[in-house]
Amino acid sequence: MSYRLRLLINMGMLVVLLGGIMAQSFRTAHDLIVEGAEDHLRHASLAKEQAVHSQLDDLLHYSRIVAADQRLQEYLYIITEVGASHEGLASYLDRQFASLPRDHRMVLSSQGEVLVGDEDFAELRESVWRHLQSKGPGGFYFRSARGVMMAAVAPVHFEDELLAYVVMARLMDSNWLRRQEALSDDRLLFFEQGGEVLWSSNDRYRGARLSDGQLLGHNGQSFRVREIALPDRDGQVPRLWFGISETRLMRSLERYEKQAYLLAILGIAIVMLVGWRMLRNFNRAFSKLMHTTQEMIDGKLPVVRRSGSRSQMDRLVNRFADVLDALRREQEEVKRVYRKLQETAITDSLTGLYNRRYLDEMAPALFAQVERDQRYLTAILLDLDFFKAVNDRYGHLGGDAVLVHFSRLLKHNSRANDYLFRIGGEEFLILNVTEDPADSVALADKVRQLVAGSPANYRGVEIPMSVSAGVSCSDGRSGEGSLSRLMRAADKALYEAKSGGRNRVVVHGSCREAGEILKHRAHLTVVSSSQKGRPEKH
């Protein structure tokens, strides 16, 4: 067999091998990107599901607060047992509980009569009464003409006698969906029934069709979707879905596929062109190529040393090295895209700070470090004062500008071992492992002073800012639930800061080591573990 024939045979093998490597590279990239998108959808939908369930729990909590009010119980006893007028009951509820977040409020007698509330809203009364007859008090969902309703029912007892039911409801319409998911072409929250979108966070997709786990919408845009479970939902209530656009994902895959094919064609052409001219120094160069291909068969992308020789075979080896370098670069690009997807899953898109999901993931490691090193984990819970007023005056874009400005102040003035989180809305968190909790108290007061002296700028208008902070500490020995206890303590301290006039730092009693610094700072206060409550946000 001549050298030329051997060369042709081996070059054919190289072409097949190169094509296989490119095909395998594309399949790997496809799997990584698609799996990353599926993971992101799963985590994001679980976060949405937890948020919806939390809202129902909050509504139940508020209804029980009202039902437990002693004066309300006395009012209802007089109304139901003595037959007095219930006109004063409505004004009392307005005075005492007007700040509780809800769209509808109703008080039903034990016989189903509307004592206080929206008497014209018959759907609410009928749905609540059906639920009471079948399952008793609690939280549930039902469909109304205006949208899905989230309702919570709590019984009112007086001296072990059932007097009435307190009902609170929230309308889950398009406005509610937009509050849960900002208007976007990439993310969508919607209600669907019978395969048709009824209400959506983006009105362009209202009326779109859902089939086979895909939502097809405006201009051919498609979404990967996942259902958000609503507990105690009957068959009349539309299903709630969360979707992430897969159009951008498909475009990325198409671009990568074209590049891969182009690179494969270019590599094959180079190999075949140079191969016909590789006659001199054939044995040396051929052995080198055989060794390289064996490594590639073993799943490696070896680094080929380039030759300065002008022979055809050596030039082929050099070109083959270029192809391997290009493959390595493509692999790095795939890894970069995958890392970007991971980063997106744990960071807040507006501020770039860590999100609540990452807090839940990293908290066990921090508590383990605290217990191992016998140090403290401090939590600084910060809440921008009067943020609702900023949104009302400057709009959501102005509010976003304030949030971004505040997050930059946190980044520029925090320490290297501080973990910065945006918990939600205008609420932020700083976690730090320290030997001296007083350092974290000092940081909280430093941030407070910086914020007070650094107004945000929106369209040439300076927006004054202030922040209230609550600081709590943990030595890591409280076992399971340490994070929730640490956050509750910081939340109590934050409540005291808000109640004390805002633009303050309040330190929870768990930070015993920070006691000395409080004697010298006018804006710092200590709050004990027994104080409870949470102020209304403005």
Image (cartoon, grey):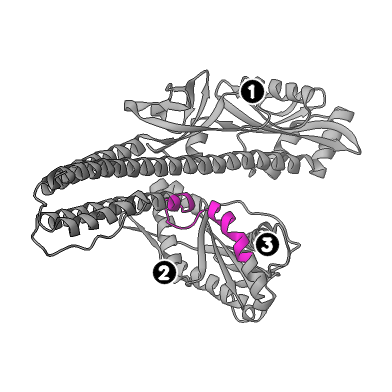
> Which three-letter amino acid code belongs to the residue tagged 3?
Ala
Residue shown at 19% from the left, 44% from the top: 11
Residue 533 in which image quadrant: bottom right
- Which of the marked residues, 3 or 2, is nearer the chain's N terminus? 2
The alpha-carbon separation of the residues under discs 2 and 1 comes to 52 Å
Q: Which mark is residue 31?
A: none
> Which three-letter amino acid code belongs to the residue tagged 2?
His
* Camera-nearest residue between 382 and 187: 187
Q: Which mark is residue 121?
A: 1
Q: Which residue is mark 2?
A: 412
Image position of 94 with respect to 330: above or below: above
* Camera-nearest residue between 270 and 464: 270
Residue shown at 44% from the left, 41% from the top: 37
- Disc 2, SS: helix
The alpha-carbon separation of the residues under discs 3 and 2 comes to 26 Å
- Disc 1, SS: loop
Q: Farthest top residue? A: 194
> Which three-letter amino acid code belongs to the residue tagged 1?
Phe
The x and y percentages for residue 142 are: 64, 25
- Is label 2 or label 1 in front? 2
The x and y percentages for residue 321 are: 22, 56
- Is label 1 or label 3 in front? 3
Residue 131 in which image quadrant: top right
Stretch of the chain drawn in magenta: 342-367
Q: Which mark is residue 489?
A: 3
Q: Is residue 320 visible?
A: yes
- Disc 3, SS: helix
Callout 2 environment at 10 Å: few (<14), some (14 to 19), or many (20+)? few
- Which of the marked residues, 2 or 1, is nearer the chain's N terminus? 1
Image position of 444 with respect to 3: above or below: below
